[in-house]
Each structure stands twice: as C-alpha cells, then as structure tokens.
Amino acid sequence: MRKTATLAALFLAGALLAPVVALADSTITAAGSTALLPLVKEAAAEYQAKHPDVKIAVSGGGSGTGINQVVAKAIDIGNSDIAAVGQPTLVDHKVAVTGFAIVAHPGVGVTNLTRKQLQDIFSGKTQSWKDVGGADVKITVINRPRNSGTRAVFIKTIMGDVPISASGLTEDATGSVVATVKTTPGAISYAAFAGTRGQGLTELSIDGVAPTDDNVAAGKYPYWSYEHMFTNGPPSPEISRFIAYITSNSDLVHKAGYILVRDMKVTETDR
Amino acid sequence: MAIAVPPRIKAVASRAHRSEFVATLLLRAACALVVLSIAALIAYLASEGTKLFTHDHVSPFEFLFSPVFNPEANHPGSLVFIVGSLAITAFAVFVGGPFGIAVGVLLSELAPRRFVDVMKPAVEVLVGIPSVIYGWIGLTLLVPLIRTVTGSNGFGLLAAGIVLSVMILPTIITLSEDALRAVPDSLREGSAAMGATRWQTISRVLLPAASSGLTVAVILGVARAIGETMAVQLVIGNAAVLPTGLLSATAALPTEIVQDMSGAQQGSLLEHALFSMALLLLLIAMGLILAVRLAVRRRA
Amino acid sequence: MAQAAVTSEAALERRRRGAAGRRLGDQVATGLLWAAAISVLVLLALFVGYIFFLGIGSISWQFLTSPPSEVTAGGGIGPEIYNSFYILIMTLVFTVPVALAAGIYLQEYAKPGLFQTVVQFSAESLATVPSIVMGLFGLLIFVYLFGWRFSAIGGALTLTILNLPALMRVTQEALATVPDSLREASMSLGATRWTTILRVVLPSAIGPLTTGVVLIAGRIFGETAALIYTAGVSVAAGRAAYDLNPFRPAETLAVHVWYTHAESVVPDVARIGNGSALVLLVMVLLFNVTARVVGRFLTYRFTRKS
C-alpha cells in the first residue's frame, strides 16, 4: 500500500515537473521532407561527430508533416520541398536545390517521355507502356500522399491543371517509392535525385532532357525545387550553427546528391 | 467499553482499519483513473471529430456517403475508406470465421489432450506476433505471390483480407473453443444416447447451443479487424478509390489516418476529416461491444 | 422377436446405408476439422520460419549495437532495441500499479452498483479503442497539449492507457483462481480484507499474474501505431540515444520495421527491415516462453509454501 502511494506520488511529481524538464531537453529535432532527408541526416551525423555535446534527431514524414509540426512547435526544424504558404511565423532557410526524377521499373522499355505523355499516364488516360513505345506491360502508377512536397512540386511543374488519378498506389516516402518501383513491373513514380541515384531504376528524360544536376542548374530540366529548413521564429544559436554548417559545406551537399543554391542559373520565387 | 482491551491490540486494530481505509481509497482512485481515461478520450475525440461538421460545415451525409475524397476542394467524402474497411473485415470474417470455429470445435470436442497442449501455445504465439510483422510478411511474401498468380500488382483487398483473416484466427479459435467447452456434457450424452454420430452432435446440438458464445467470438474478431492498422497499411495499396474487385488497391479508415495524419496541418479540413474518421472508428468499436453485451444477455 | 422377423430386407438395407452415410459424413467432417487445425500450425511454422530465413543474414553484433544510418548502408538497430525496452519498462511501471489496483477493487471489493458498472464499462470501452485512435489521443494530449513534443514518456503513457483493460482482466482472472476458502480462513483469523489480499490472495495468484504481465509486455514490445505519433520515429545520434531522459524522441524496434519500409532511402532497406523483423519476433517469442515458464515456477513456489 505504501509502495503504491509512493509510486503514485512519484508519478504525479513527474507529470508536474515534466514541462520544466522538457524545456531543459536540448535535442534538436528535425523532420519533414524525405527528399531532403539524406542531406540533413548526413549533415547531422557529421555535425554531431564534430560537436559531441549536441544531439540531433532527424526523421521523415513528408514536407507537409515538417511544416505542420514546426508550426505546432512539436519539432525545431521543418524540412520541406515547398514554400510554406500562409505561415508568417516561419523563417525560411534555403539550404540546397534538388532535382526530382521520374523513375520506372527497368524493363518498361522507355527512356524518354514528353510532358503530355506524363500527364496522360498519371491522370490514368494511358494504361499500358505499349502506348508510349515501350514493352507490353500494364502501367502501375505510384503516388506520394497529399503531404508530400515531392508530389506538390510534381503537380506544379509537370501536371499543371491535369488532375492525378486517384487509382494509383500510394507510398509514404522517397524510400518506399524506390523500393516499390524496384519490385513492381510496369511501375512509374517520382522521387528526389538523392533517393533514386544508383538504385538500378530507369530514370526517364522529360522532353528529351536528362535528369542530371547540370541540366537542373541550367534550368533545362523542369522538375526541381529548393530545399527549405523552416524554423518557427528566428532559430536558436545552436540551430543556426547547424543550418549554417549545411549551407557553407559544398562537399557535403554534392556528396549527398544535391545542388548548391548558388550554382543555379535560374531562380523561382514560389518553390 | 465493557471489555478492557489492551492498548497494544487496540493500536494494531485501528492501524489495520486505517490502512484498510487508505487502501480502499487508493483502489478506488485507480478505478477513477480508468474512468477518467476513457472519458477524456471520448470527450477529446468527440470534440475534434465533430469540428468537420460544426467548423467546416461539411454535412455528415457527404462525409459518410460521398465517394469523392478531395479535402483540398472541401470534399472529404469518406465512403471509400468505410467501404474498404467493411470489405476487408467481411473477407476476414467469412474466411477466418469458419476456419477459426472449425479449429475451436476440434480443440474442444475431438482433439486428444496432447494435441491441445501443442495447439494452445501455438495459438498464443499467433496472438503475440506484432502486427508490423504480419504486415512485413504480407509485403514480402503475400504480395509478390498474388502478383505472380494473378498478374496484378499484388496490393489490394485480397492481400489485406488474407492478412486480416490470419490475424483474427487466434481470437476466434480461443473464444469458440471456450464457448463450446461451456456447453454442458448432458447435451452431448443425450445426443449420443439417441444414436447421433459425433458430427451430428456437433452440428445439430452443440453449435446451436454455443451460438451466443460463437457470435461473441465473431464480433470480437470483427472488432480486432476493424481497428487493425499497420498490417493492412503495408499491403492494401493506399489508393483512395472504391474497390472494384478483390485485386483493386484501396484504403481503409485506419490506414488513411496513418497515411495522412502527420502531414495534415492543424486546424485544416483534412485534419478534421481524419479525426472524424477516428471518431467513426471509435463509435463502431464501442457499438460492437454493445452488440457483445446484448448477445451475452440473450443467452442468460 | 417376432417384430424383428417381420422387418423387411429392404428396410434393413436402407438403415445400414443410412448409417454408413452418416459415418462417412462424420469422417469427412472430422478430416476437414483436422486439416484446419494442422494448417494453422503449418501457417505459424511458415511465418516464423520465413522471418528467420529472411532475417538471419542480417544479424550480427554490429547490427544489434550500432546506430541506424539513413543515407549509407550498414546501419544497425542498437538504439531502437534500447528504446523498446526503455518504453516497455516505463509503461509497466505506470500500468501495473493502476491496473492491479483497479482489478483488485473490481474483483474483491466491488458491490453491484453504479460505481462498479461505470468502471466495468469504462474498462470494456477502453479495450475496444483501436491503437491508432489511442495514438491520436496521445498526440493531442502529450505532444500538443502538454507540450512534451515527441517523447518516450508520452509514448509510455499512451501505451499505459491502451493496456490498462488487458492487465485489469489478467488481475481479475488471476485473483479468481484463488479459492474463497483461503480468504475466509484469513479473515476468520482476524485479518482485514486488505491484509488478506496483500498477504494471502496476491501471493497465491502470483503465477497467473506474472504470466499475464509478461504476455502483455510482449504485446507492448510489438506496439507500433500508438507510438508513431507519440514517441516519434527518430533517435538521437551517438551516446545520447542511450540516455535515461524520458522527454526525447524514442523510436522503438517495432516502429523501426515500419519506418524502414516507409521512409528509408538506404540501399540496404530490405536487409535492415528483415533483420529488425527477426529481432522483434525473437523478442516476442522469448516473452511468450518466459511468461509460461516463470508463471509455472512461481505458482509452484508460492502454493507449495502455503
């Protein structure tokens, strides 16, 4: 009985002290875009190796999740492929640029698609690879969920007003998209360069332009976006230092598969 | 006092009474915590789950019956997910139900003690396997299998239905075995005395006698299936369209929640719609419990 | 005797065939039932065997102790295993006292009435809440309302509410195995109800109680949906992943299996997923076996003494 009472008292005390201790916890949490995830994860690993007293926890969830959670102050840094609309408290830090590739299962027999063909495929009008000059395999469209920045940029730069058909499969993140396309014959989807390179998938050219960093920097390849790290209000000194580590470290950016912001020959204001 | 009680005994007695009083108080406090938890849960979910109707002025009719799920355009019709949930649950019940009852019958009536001693732990292990593992097996074994056999992409109702059937098997097996064991032996003896074969006894006497217990088993299997998230989400394909057949990719209420919750902005229509789905799930689950209570009462 | 002689040959033949038909039906039905049971056993063996086969190649000391990698190959699951146990122990610390107390009250004290009905109904309702819905509740309360963000303790408290009904039922069933004669004997010696429970009933019920607790521990270990939105999907790097701070994100092994498939961009996703699934399965099986063994041992020790 006394033990129960003691436990109950401890529990209550803990619950009351909790908010205080929570303020004292100094883990930097970052979450959001899975397109940006490789870069932030790599940066966090390197940064923590150099500064052992700093703790950084990074996860995915999609650009929408990143923005949503940083607005709700559940995390410190929200990673996103898209600009945050209607969020005046968020401070934007553009850390890199990423291109996104249209990927397909090897064996579909096609290496290039026009924008119109892409729109027809993803809106459900074209059902077979045969209709675009490929093998006689049914097209399996794989989409990202609503909260995905990759999907939002895809709609903005490729689909335009053509609606994406709801009947495709949906995979949560860059990683699961790549895994599913690899194992599903006839599959087609979209993901960031960092996720698709070296995976053995067919990376399709759009209107004859190959998905390379140089083509993105030159503005010839249309499917790209800035990578944002949002903070709710001005970042703390520790977070500032971490973000600065990424923006000043061109080796890291290139090694992780991204493009430096300053290398871009074109700019966009709404990405 | 008429009898002089030695002070030491008086002290011990009153200390015992005091500790009894404190103990009872703490026990009741624990019960109160249980009540508080469910009350808070219902209150919070009801408040968030109805914002779709009060705040965003979406009609419940549209939410429940419209197949168009387009929250960006203010059309959160969730019929797709409701139908998806019902479809995979129905599959699981019609496949796993008879299977589970069959095994329950065997364990209760036909199997020797040694076999039951092997089977019981096996069923308990099946219960203990986490749902992510079921999902993982579904993803790496079942989906490619369906793909090879049928030529579709493997994801969809069939995969989710099969996974769910296996998951509710242990529940149905255990409960139907218990239901059958509860039937008094006098019925078995009476039936045998009239010359019935074992199977005739089972099918015409025991199963009807245990029917309310078997109904409970099935209802609880349904309850387990309706709320299952992880295993289903990995194999159902997550396409917000009404299923057209066993092989079409679709989505269910819990999988849609897990899919879009983290990305839904606080206060947005999508977030409210997801909470309405959660509220719907909660109401269905609680409704099933009421059904169980009614089934039990009918037998008594 | 005379009657038997009158019965025609045809009628006897019909009766014999009818009996044979019923026997055949009996045999067919029995065969089907046995087939069903055997296939369940085969299914179980298949599942366990398949996970072993898939994952055994990933298991190594390095895999079990190193931190996860999100970009390059070669990541491990060390912190996730730690978090699984950490959250499990925290959850049990919260759940066992409350569930034990409530279960004792319902089984030993409660008289039929409003309070008892309300508590019983609450427990039953709580038991039906799907884990994803519980996870959303935890998100609202612990992450947003309390402001704890993603934390191990938020996850543990969510799991506590989720498992209260199960542990209450275990308590009640364990207490029911203790014969009333023990209670009466104790009270006739002058002990109060509470003393009786504490010193006589509980020790006698310790076997089934422990079995139930360990089985539920296995279920907690495998829980995913309720933890994604409360304890989060990330771990801090380096030694910080192994600290005792309950207010930090704490991805568990079960969540990691899901997360690996859904989010990871490493080239060896399959290897990590398979290895994590295997470790998770082995742990759950261990919990299952331990529950039974320990329960039987404790019952033997405690009931022999009394």
Image (cartoon, coloured by chain):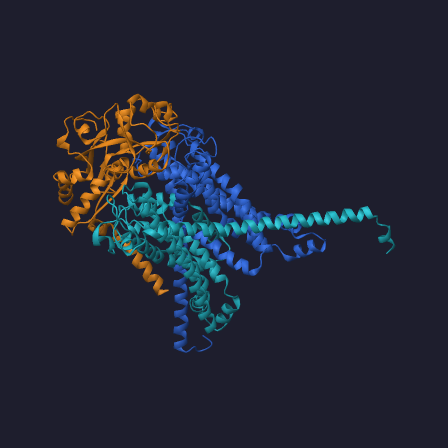
Q: Nearer the viewer, residue A211 or C22?
A: A211
Specify the quadrant of the image occupied by residue B153: top left
Please tell me whether residue C98 is drawn above or below residue B203 in the rendered image: below
The hue used for chain A is orange
- Coordinates of residue A72 in the picture (x, y in percent): 26, 39
The hue used for chain C is cyan
Total numbered badges shown on the rendered structure: 0
- Coordinates of residue B122 in the picture (x, y in percent): 48, 55
- Coordinates of residue A40 in the picture (x, y in percent): 20, 41
Task: Name the quarter where the C terminus of chain A is drawn.
Answer: top left
The chain letter of the blue chain reads B
Please tell me whether residue B8 is drawn above or below residue B285 in the rendered image: below
Q: Is residue C306 visible?
A: no
Q: Nearer the viewer, residue C100 or B170?
A: B170
Q: Is residue C184 visible?
A: yes
Q: Nearer the viewer, residue C127 or B43?
A: C127
Task: Name the quarter where the N terminus of chain A is drawn.
Answer: bottom left
- Coordinates of residue B56 in the picture (x, y in percent): 35, 30
Q: Nearer the viewer, residue C197 or C173?
A: C173
Specify the quadrant of the image occupied by residue B259: top left
Residue B141 located left or right of residue A51:
right
